[in-house]
Amino acid sequence: MARPRLAILTSGGDAPGMNAAIRAATLVALAHNATVLGVEQGYRGLINGDFRPLEAHDVVELVRAGGTALGTARCPEFRERAVRDVARRRLRDARIDHVLVIGGNGSLAGAHALGDPHEQLEDWPVRVIGLPASIDNDVGTTSLAIGVDTAMNTIVEACDRIADTATAHHRTFIVEVMGRDCGYLAMAAGIGAGANLVLFREAGLALDGLVDAVCDTVAQAARRPNHRALILKSEGVEVPVEQLKAAVNARLAAAGEDAIEAELRVTVLGHVVRGGRPSALDRLMASRLAHAGVLALLDGAGDQMVAWQPGRPPARATRTAVDPRCWLVPLADVLAETQALHDGTSPQAQWRVKVFDALEGVLNRG
Ligand code: F6P
């Protein structure tokens, strides 16, 4: 039997732990007699045929590295069938028949399209498996995606530092964190950082509601001995943070004699949150997902994602042969659930908000 040839690609926004997944996937595949190729710069490299062989010595040190050693890219052109066919011909030319895609929502949509049985070249079908990786934790059917834990730790550490200076000056800080379509990072890190208020898109507040919430928080802070407040704002809340600050200042100024004096400052953490060495949990989870994913791929699975699910598995999930926490879920189901997480119709999204509201209501009393 011909030796299987497996390509690994990382795509979309990088996430800490992608390298740990590349490392584990490579070592597992080599141990199972596959030839491994890395694809440079995600789907763009696939279209250009930018493949390079990966051996154990190329990946052993990757476990502790942030970013992705293969590079990554956003590649909207991969939505076009003709472009995917170019990629399929590149795979055929390089005799690659298995592909492991590590990425978030857009990358997994690309994986589903690449592995679509109706689009395969007659003489060279490929099988594709995805691993969830996105700091936003907005990939459906997995309880965690690679990168979320590290990103949360980075935010909490940054907030601890900001709290020091906020307390010293009796100031209110609004700290914006990534999360374009999903407020999970802000909510989870907000609890970890002891934030006084978290603004996330799922709450659906317009400018007036946001200003009310910030002004209430400022008023509460004025009654506390340290006079400071820490507010986390998710990027998905569409009002720009400087506009929010200006609107709050205007509201406070308009209060005349009853005005509360507040010094507002803004910090946008932005891409700082995507970088850095992966946490132990991200390294462990990435390694286990990659292990289960490569074995499933070599065993004939395709068009599925490996989900990290300690609790009840998603409806059409099948257990992986090697790991009780890793489940294979059809990519079509993953994408549908991701959409539901984004538009708030997913029970999981609703639970997240409910649990957050209940806990925050208690933690932030007084
Ligand atoms: O990877 C997801 C994400 O971090 C979003 O939260 C954010 O909006 C986006 O990436 C930023 O992407 P880019 O680095 O392409 O500007």
Image: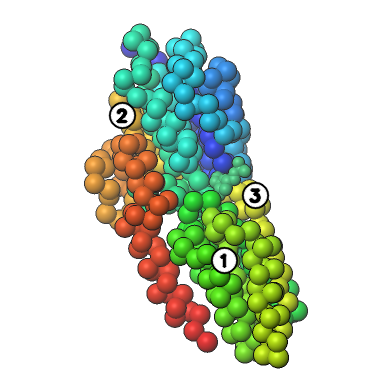
Discs 2/3, front: 3
Residue at image location 42% in from the left, 34% down from the top: 109
**Rounded to the nearest whole Å, what is the CA distance between mark 2 and mark 1?**
48 Å
Question: Horizontally, is 41 left or right of 288 in the view?
Answer: right
First in residue order: circle 2 vs circle 3: 3
Q: Which residue is mark 1?
A: 207
First in residue order: circle 2 vs circle 1: 1
**Rounded to the nearest whole Å, what is the CA distance between mark 3 and mark 1?**
25 Å
- Identify residue type, mark 1: Leu
Question: Horizontally, is 23 left or right of 303 in the view?
Answer: right
Discs 3/1, front: 1
Residue 206, position in %: x, y? 52, 64
Q: Which residue is mark 3?
A: 271
In the image, residue 75 sits, relative to residue 141, either above or below, namely above
Residue at image location 46% in from the left, 17% down from the top: 82
- Of 36 and 177, nearer the camera is 177
Report the quarter where the N terminus lies.
Answer: top left
